[in-house]
Image (cartoon, rainbow, N blue to C red):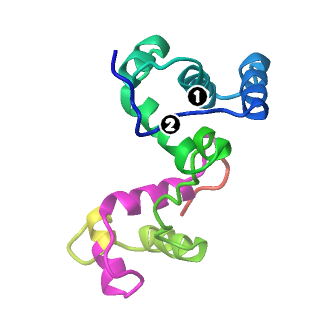
Amino acid sequence: MTYNRLYHVTLTDEERTTLLALTKTGKATGRIFTRAHILLLADETQASDEELAALLHTSSDTVQRTRRKFVEGNLDGALHEKRRPGARVKFTPEQERQVALLACSDAPEGRAVWTLRLLADRLVEMGMVDAISHETVRQALKKMTPSPGSRRPMC
């Protein structure tokens, strides 16, 4: 049996009580529940990351990451993830309205209708954005399109 000595988990009585209560209430998310069990077993046994992962039906990377976050940070840091900012918004609500108005306007000369790629190119030409994909334009138009059966058409 190999033991991961780099991130040795030693829980205080208070931390152990908190984790036990967390696992017994059933109100924690699956990820938090798994992390709590990882910390409890890591403290009780001298099992390796691979052994704990097999016991808890998770990956050894999850076990190692949870141990590391606990040792380098604290219990809260090991249980909860940091917020992820996600991608920045491409259009403001006003710009989305302008995209919808452009899509409702007459198509360029020689075209019967606006295509998503034409709309994306025109938005760049107008200077509304530096660059934009046709998929982002589609998503903006989809948000502006009323649900089926609605009395207010987009155009």
For the point 38% across and 73% down, the residue is: 106
Q: Are marks 2 and 1 in contact (CB under 8 Å)?
A: yes
Question: In this picture, is 139 found above or below 76?
Answer: below
Determine the secondary structure under disc 2.
helix
Q: Is residue 90 visible?
A: yes
Q: Is residue 68 magenta?
A: no
Kind of residue indicated by mark 1: Leu
Determine the secondary structure under disc 1.
helix
For the residue pair 11 and 154, the one nearer the viewer reads as 11
Instruction: Indicate the quadrant where residue 147 lies.
Output: top right
Q: Residues within 10 Å of mark 1 (few under 14, many from 20)?
A: many
Q: Residues within 10 Å of mark 2 (few under 14, many from 20)?
A: many
Q: Is residue 139 magenta?
A: yes
For the point 31% across and 76% down, the residue is: 131
Q: Residue furthest top?
A: 55
Q: Position of residue 80 (x, y in %)?
A: 62, 42
- Quadrant where the C terminus sits is bottom right
Kind of residue indicated by mark 2: Arg
For the residue pair 1 and 68, the one nearer the viewer reads as 1
Q: How many marks?
A: 2
Q: Which residue is mark 1?
A: 39
Q: Position of residue 49 (x, y in %)?
A: 40, 25
Q: Position of residue 15 (x, y in %)?
A: 73, 34
Q: Position of residue 59 (x, y in %)?
A: 39, 25
Question: In this picture, is 71 found above or below 102?
Answer: above
Residue 34 shown left or right of residue 102 in the figure: right
Magenta stretch: give its range. 121-149
For the residue pair 22 and 147, the one nearer the viewer reads as 22
What separation in Å lies between label 2 and label 1 (alpha carbons)?
Answer: 7 Å
Q: Which residue is mark 2?
A: 67
Q: Is residue 115 visible?
A: no
